[in-house]
Image: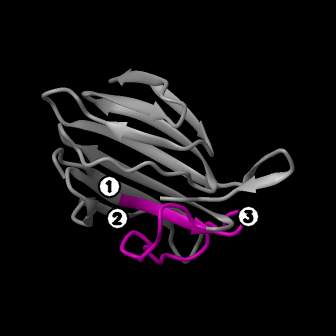
Amino acid sequence: MTIKLRRVVTGHDENGRARVLIDEQVQNTFSHRAGAEFSVIWSTEGFPVSNDGNEDPANKKIGTAIENGSVFRIVSFAPGVAPRNHRTSSIDYGVVMQGEIDMILDDGVSVTLRAGDVLVQRGTIHDWVNNGTETCVIAFSLIAARPVTANGKPLLPQG
């Protein structure tokens, strides 16, 4: 990961008192395309979410989203990142932490997002293009959603 991330996770002791379970430098960095890396900070399955137990799901193998669950990840996009048009079956909340990036939709519309900008991605086909000279880092929270429908047909995840 191009930036150092510290992950702090709280939980409970056997008497129900709050405690810090994890306080560490994030090490679980993955990449599925040139110029993009991500680290899963936490994920959940089922709604409502259970806060019981102390199992750490950060290294669990998951796709972009989890059916009936959530994923919190940090993604780093280097300048010239490889293209990847895709749609997820989730509602994605994003916060640009560093740099800037262009979000390009399937109709060709491009929106530049900069550090401090927030995004709500609602199942649209999109690509992330870093035309700048600095790495862009975005925090994403992806929460399972039903597929979008158009003319009565579901628009399924792709890419």
* Residue at horizontal 38 percent and vertical 50 percent from the top: 84
Q: Identify residue for label 3.
A: 47
Q: Is residue 62 magenta?
A: yes
Looking at the image, do the residues carrying marks 1 and 2 touch, with CB atoms under 8 Å apart? Answer: yes
Between discs 1 and 2, the one toward the N terminus: 1
Q: Is residue 60 magenta?
A: yes
The spot of residue 156 in percent (x, y) is: 66, 59
Between discs 1 and 3, the one toward the N terminus: 1
Identify the amino acid type marked 2.
Ile
The spot of residue 12 in percent (x, y) is: 53, 67
Task: Give the magenta-colored segment's residue range.
Answer: 40-66
* Foreground of the two, 13 or 1: 1
Q: Is residue 30 above or below residue 147?
A: below
Give the image's coloring scheme.
one colour
Question: Residue 7: which numbered mark, if any?
Answer: 1
* Residue at horizontal 26 percent and vertical 46 percent from the top: 76
Q: Identify residue for label 2.
A: 22
Identify the amino acid type marked 3.
Phe
Position of residue 83 in the picture relative to residue 15 (left or right): left
Looking at the image, the residue that sits furthest to the right is: 152
Position of residue 152 in the picture relative to residue 100 (left or right): right
Q: Is residue 64 above or below residue 121?
A: below
Task: Please identify the quarter of the rendering in which residue 147 is found.
Answer: bottom right
Looking at the image, do the residues carrying marks 2 and 3 touch, with CB atoms under 8 Å apart? Answer: no
- Report the mark closest to the observer, 1 or 2: 1
Q: Secondary structure at mark 3?
A: loop
Q: CA distance from mark 2 to mark 3?
A: 23 Å
Q: CA distance from mark 1 to mark 3?
A: 23 Å
